[in-house]
């Protein structure tokens, strides 16, 4: 017999939310340790400013569209584009990686490595 995590809410009430139901169902499937970690993350997420949430999302999932990032972070898309830190993060993520160049020794091991100047 499974325990009910919360009472049933009447259809149409503010607590009758399919997304909330999906989150609760997902949490139930996690180990107790993973549940605690997720709840700590959600607590931190809820306390963060919208710009911080947007930057975290973009950093973790750079392929998300700005519209989705704004919606999930709880900020208007146009407001997001006015934030210099968010625009700078997008530019950094869009830039090609600066990979080191190097030389190998006779055994195929790394002999030395250096970064090329970008300019």
Image (spheres, grey):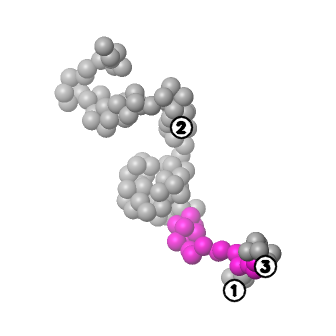
| Residue underneath mark 1 | 119
Residue 10 percent location from the top left of the image: 20, 23
* In front of the other: 19 or 80: 19
Closest to the camera, between mark 2 and mark 3, is 3
Spatial CA span between label 2 and label 1: 40 Å
Residue at left 55%, top 33%? 37
SS for callout 2? helix
SS for callout 1? loop
Residue at left 30%, top 17%? 7
Does residue 27 appear to the left or right of 99 in the view shown? left
Residue 64 percent location from the top left of the image: 41, 60
Does residue 26 appear to the left or right of 118 in the view shown? left
Q: Residues within 10 Å of mark 3 (few under 14, many from 20)?
A: few
Residue at left 31%, top 31%? 21
Closest to the camera, between mark 3 and mark 1, is 3
| Residue underneath mark 2 | 41
Q: Is residue 51 visible to us here?
A: no
Q: Which image quarter holds the N terminus?
A: top left
Magenta region: 87-104
* Label drawn at residue 20: none
Residue 86 percent location from the top left of the image: 53, 61
Residue 112 counted in the magenta span:
no
> Residue 119: which quarter of the image?
bottom right
* In front of the other: 46 or 104: 104
| Residue underneath mark 3 | 106
- Total marks shown come to 3
Which sits earlier in the primary sequence, circle 2 or circle 1? 2
Residue at left 32%, top 17%? 2
């Amino acid at each position: 017999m499974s325990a009910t995590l919360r009472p049933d809410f009447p259809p149409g009430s503010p607590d009758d939310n399919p997304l909330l139901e999906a989150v609760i169902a997902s949490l139930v499937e996690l180990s107790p340790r993973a549940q605690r970690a997720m709840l700590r993350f959600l607590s931190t997420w809820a306390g963060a400013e919208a710009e911080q949430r947007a930057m975290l999302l973009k950093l973790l999932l750079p392929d998300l569209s700005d519209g989705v990032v704004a919606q999930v972070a709880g900020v208007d898309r146009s407001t997001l584009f006015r934030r210099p830190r968010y625009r700078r993060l997008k530019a950094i993520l869009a830039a090609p990686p600066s990979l080191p160049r190097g030389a190998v020794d006779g055994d195929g091991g790394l002999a030395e490595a250096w970064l090329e100047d970008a300019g």
